[in-house]
Image: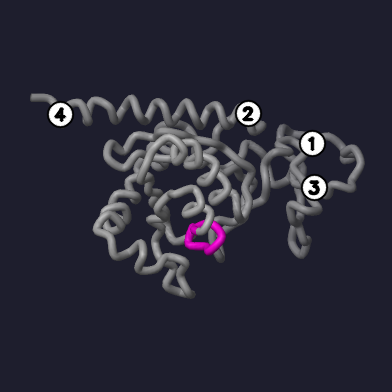
């Protein structure tokens, strides 16, 4: 999700206090970024230091972002856990392990569905160490860490179909729950808002579930 911070605030960490004259006429001062190399290692936002520069995919615009993570129960489609982290290449896998571990300790035969971005040998091995069955989509562009031990079970195909329902939750939280670009700053505040939006999504979904089981 996009952070409430302007790219103009993403400035070199070595810079001292902002000595630029204050803007006039009610607008931000002009800034020219062409040819300037900027990265999270050398730059930080002066208004949202927790936000990190992140590009979702090749060719896409880099923005100051957070990453929201959610764990969904397949049968009901309800969100059972959430967390918010700084944007980073391994943030999704680390968050997934943190959310699934306590459930794996309490329940036998836990499975975890995920898209092909999670098809990494170290992540799959960690899941198996936790006794979690890795129902991760295979990345066919390279050698997949998911083999016949997993794909031969009918439950794997079921997980692949149902896991896409998580996009409904993220879509609702962004379009209705105000999480596309929340007007808050800092991980604690944005994280609380993200969890609150997930709870609201569950409340919206509950009547549909109750109607399905009603006599």
Image quadrant where one finds the C terminus:
top left
Image check: 40 left or right of 168? Answer: right
Q: Which mark is residue 188?
A: 2
Q: Kindly identify which numbered label has been placed on residue 23.
A: 1
Q: Would you say the residues marked 1 and 3 are in contact, meaning their CB atoms lie under 8 Å apart? A: no
Does 14 appear above or below 214?
below
- Taking the spot 44% from the left edge, 37% from the top edge, the residue there is 103
Residue projecting furthest to the bottom: 142
Closest to the camera, between mark 1 and mark 3, is 3
Residue 119 lies in the magenta-colored region: yes
Identify the magenta region.
Answer: 118-124
Looking at the image, do the residues carrying marks 2 and 3 touch, with CB atoms under 8 Å apart?
A: no
Give the percent coordinates (x, y) of residue 160: 32, 56
Q: Main secondary structure of the magenta part?
A: helix
Give the residue pinned by disc 4. 213
Instruction: Report how far apart the C-alphas of labels 4 and 3 lie in the structure.
Output: 55 Å
The mark tally for this picture is 4
Q: Name the residue under label 3.
A: 11
State which quadrant residue 37 falls in.
bottom right
Dot 2 falls on a residue whose secondary structure is helix
């Amino acid at each position: 999700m996009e952070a409430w911070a302007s790219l103009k605030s993403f400035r070199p960490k070595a810079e001292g206090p902002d000595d630029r004259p204050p803007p006039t006429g009610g607008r931000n001062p002009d800034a020219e970024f062409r040819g300037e190399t900027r990265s999270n290692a050398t730059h930080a936002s002066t208004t949202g230091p927790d936000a990190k520069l992140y590009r979702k995919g090749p060719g896409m615009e880099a923005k100051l972002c957070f990453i929201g993570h959610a764990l969904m129960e397949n049968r009901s489609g309800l969100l059972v856990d959430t967390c918010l982290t700084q944007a980073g290449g391994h943030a999704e896998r680390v968050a997934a392990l943190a959310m699934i571990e306590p459930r794996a300790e309490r329940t036998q035969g836990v499975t975890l569905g995920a898209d092909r971005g999670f098809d990494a040998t170290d992540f799959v091995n960690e899941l198996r160490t936790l006794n979690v069955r890795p129902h991760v989509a295979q990345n066919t562009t390279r050698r997949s860490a998911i083999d016949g031990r997993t794909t031969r079970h009918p439950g794997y195909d079921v997980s692949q179909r149902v896991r896409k329902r998580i996009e409904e939750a993220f879509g609702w939280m962004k379009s209705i729950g105000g999480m596309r670009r929340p007007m808050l700053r800092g991980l604690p505040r944005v994280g609380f808002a993200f969890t609150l939006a997930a709870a609201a999504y569950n409340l919206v979904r509950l009547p549909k579930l109750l109607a399905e089981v009603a006599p």
